Amino acid sequence: MTAVAQLAWVPLTIFLITYGLIAVESNVGLYLDRTATAFCGAVAMVLAGSIGPNAALAAINWGTIAFLLGMMILVAHFQVSGFFHWVAAAVARVARTRFQLLALLVFTAGILSAFFVNDTICLIFAPLLVTLTAELDLPIAPYAIALALASNIGSAMSVTGNPQNALVGVAAHFSFLDFLAHLAPVSIVGLGLELAVLAIMFRKQVFGPLPARPNPVPVKLDRTLLWKCGVASAMVLVLWVMGYSFPLVAVAVAAVILVLGRVRSGEIHHRVDWELLLFFASLFVVIRGLVASGAVARLVDVFQPWLGGPPLAQLFGMSGAMLVLANLVSNVPAVLLFRPLVPHFPHQHFAWLTLACTATLAGNLTPFGSVASLIVIQHTRRRGGVGFGEFVRVGAVVTLVTTAAAMAILAAEYKLGLHP
């Protein structure tokens, strides 16, 4: 290894530049997006000799990549079947008042996000929401913010809800039901609190009858494909409950639905988020380079007083750290940064759940805390969109009350002896 690679500051500098550019891109936008930034950071780690080529490949958690890929393929088949458009049309058809529409949107988006990934729900619901609010002459802001916040809050309850939960679930070897049992109360209570906050802060805009009935949205539902997707989803859940590994089940069922779904492969390929997979793989290498520098060991020593103490102190310390980090670099990089730290702390089961939960909820503070929020804001621009200040005004309140509720629920679970 070269002399320059012996210097701990080389990988540390690469890490800081990489995360700094990710933070800047997340908040203002650069020609070099966060995926490209992470990829360049990973290459720089190898070229600097901080980590060898073979070690770089070994650093990638292929289980997490396989899990995400498998679930993306299954969700893509649900998209092709028309299922999500059918649900959105049903919500519009059932609502009779503005508040009913808001409540149905919050809980429908939240529950669906728990099982079909929050980014996917926002990608599908946001354009439909723009059309619906225009037809009904409703302000877009309350409903757009509701969608973004609900998709994040709902996704916190399940390993399939968002990428950071997938990372935690695979790394910590959680069972599907264990994760769901501990964090479902957090999400359900959080969705209720979000609805209450929105009703108070947008009370002049979300109460009263709908100005008009929406035009029926023609939805082409492929019932045969939907039935196959439902069977595949049931297989996933049953196998996970039986204790089979998340990645193995995800890719196996993905292969089954690719064969039995009888959908042209191209229709599925372009719905897979290949950028997210490259982003994850690259950050794994960047973080491994940081670990090799010895910086992570020093971070463990620094955070030990707050994160290595009793579980409740750990809860407060990690929640505070995630509140800051998730809004600097977004919640996925924040969780990846903490991933090598958690195994050094006591009460790891409790720590992993706290990490997954608080990182997701912290992402609601600003539009840049999660990709789901950015998707909603991007799609609603043609109807005036949501301003940064308006989002933060609501997001800050929702983040604080839902995080406080999550901390109270997790603390109560610990007191009741529900965490090993």
Image: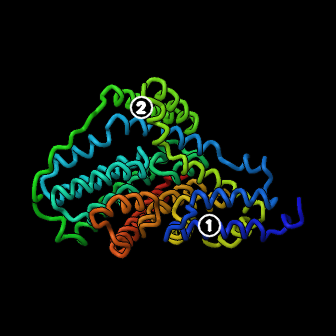
- Which disc, if any, is residue 293? none
Whether residue 315 is visible, yes or no, is: no
Q: Position of residue 199 (x, y in %)?
A: 23, 67
Relative horizontal placement of residue 374, taking residue 211 as reference (left or right):
right
- Identity of the residue drawn at 68% across and 73% down: 302
Count the labels in the image: 2
Q: Position of residue 233 (x, y in %)?
A: 42, 33
Q: How is the image coloured?
A: rainbow
Q: Which residue is mark 1?
A: 19
- In the image, is residue 272 above or below residue 412? above
- In the depicted view, which residue is nearer to us: 163 or 159? 163
Relative horizontal placement of residue 266, taking residue 390 as reference (left or right):
right
Residue type indicated by callout 2: Ala
Task: Choose mark 1 or mark 2, whichever is in front.
Answer: 1
Residue type indicated by callout 1: Tyr
Mark 2: secondary structure: helix
Q: Residues within 10 Å of mark 1 (few under 14, many from 20)?
A: many
Question: Which quadrant holds residue 246?
Answer: top right
- In the image, is residue 325 above or below residue 100? below
Mark 1: secondary structure: helix
Whether residue 290 is visible, yes or no, is: yes
- Which disc, if any, is residue 234? 2
- Identity of the residue drawn at 45% across and 51% down: 182
- In the depicted view, which residue is nearer to us: 373 or 28? 28
Q: Are marks 1 and 2 in contact (CB under 8 Å)?
A: no
- In the depicted view, which residue is nearer to us: 30 or 122? 30
Q: What is the distance, in whole Å, between disc 1 and disc 2 at their CAs? A: 39 Å
Q: Earlier in the sequence, mark 1 or mark 2?
A: 1
Q: Residues within 10 Å of mark 2 (few under 14, many from 20)?
A: few
